[in-house]
Image: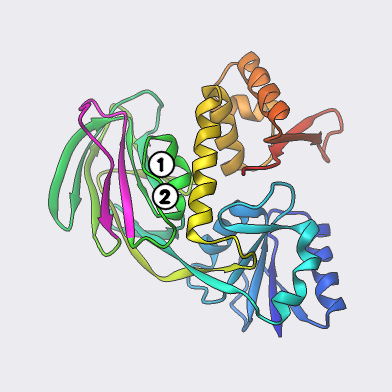
Amino acid sequence: MQIGIYASGTTDSAAKTIKKILDNEDIESFIVTSKSKAKPADCVLVLGGDKGVRNYFHRHFDSIFPVLGISEGESSGFLAQIDLREFSSYVRILKKQNYTVEEVPRLGVKIDGKNVYPVLNDVAVFSSKSAMLMEHTLRVNDEEVWHDNSDGIIISTPIGSSAYSMSAGGPMLFHDSDVFEIISVNSLDITRRPIIVSNKSSIQISDISARLHCEVVLDGLDRYKVNNTVECTQYLPPAKIIRLKKDSTAISALAKKVHLAEELLSMPPSSKLLLKTLEYEGALTQKDLANKTLLPSRTVRLALSHLLKKGYVKKKVSIRDARQKIYEISKIE
């Protein structure tokens, strides 16, 4: 058995821990880097939680190997199912290949006619400055659906329906649904509602304009300037995600999303914003959070206090500067 280990952006000690556990079970393994060519593997272990899994597929988007996402601090997410601390108890199941593989649909993206990497969660188009309206036309399969003025627009996969799109009022979708969803964010037309389309549809956002330039945000990570048009279609092959736990069905995933939605509704808006920022950006200092969210320092302190008390965020000392504290997600359940 051959297993790849992808640990970009994570600690060397975590990758060494995984390799040692595999060695003890006589499982051959090798390190996968962002630039390395694909080597034959039965599966790839990806460290860094949900963000790490997205990062892997952004850089190895034609990978055909099943991926097991492993978290290092947060509890299991929707892409990364197990924690590093419990990996040793699952390694024999992994060795016997006694697991299921879920095929996760992805969105292929073109910006002004140029291909960029496919996404697992969502494609968002917004003005480069917050609180500024963006004008756009939405077409599905070359037919115009609406011409809109709004804060922006989000196109989401089923697994991404629990992320940005849910915060914007989008529906929660079963992971195995053969659909994509489209959400206009804070449209001036109060009758505008999210729409669901077949994942075989061609989705085009064109005539994009605002007072300043507009940007496309891919999976909440990278930003690209857009002049006029964004095109989204289903990307093949789908990402393959290993499910080791028996409760990781579409039903349990939906129940988890419902619970998360209830928790989000009870949170102050500033806490929601910080939680989503940490989810997408990873560990940040208080100053970094203030810069990323544009919230006042006092508001960031209060929001962090709320998240720490609820157990959603944990605080630790920065390795680079012992005087600084960094904050990261500890659980999203």
Asked if the magenta segment contains residue 191, the reply would be yes
Up the image or down, 10 lies above or below 284; here it is below
Residue 67 part of the magenta segment: no
Locate residue 202 relative to residue 166 in the image: left or right. left
Q: Could you classify mark 1 by the number of other residues whose Cα lies within 10 Å: few (under 14), some (14-19), or many (20 or more)?
A: many
Residue 133 position, x and y percent, is 29, 27
Q: Residue at x 53, y 32 (%)?
A: 264
The magenta stretch spans which residues?
Answer: 179-198
Q: Which residue is mark 1?
A: 165
Q: Residue at x 78, y 63 (%)?
A: 15
Residue 82's place in the image compared with 165, above or below, is below
> Quick one: quadrant of the N terminus?
bottom right
SS of the residue at dot 1?
helix
Q: Tell me whether circle 2 and circle 1 mark residues in contact (CB < 8 Å).
A: yes
Residue 174 against residue 228 in the figure, above or below: below
| Residue 122 numbered mark, or none | 2
For residue 275, what is the image quadrant? top right
Between residue 205 and residue 50, name the one nearer to us: 50
**Dividing the image into 4 quarters, which one contains the C terminus?**
top right
Type of the residue with mark 1: Ser
**Front label number (2 vs 1):** 1
Looking at the image, the residue that sits furthest to the left is 143
Q: Amino acid at mark 2?
A: Asp
The answer to whether residue 259 is visible is: yes
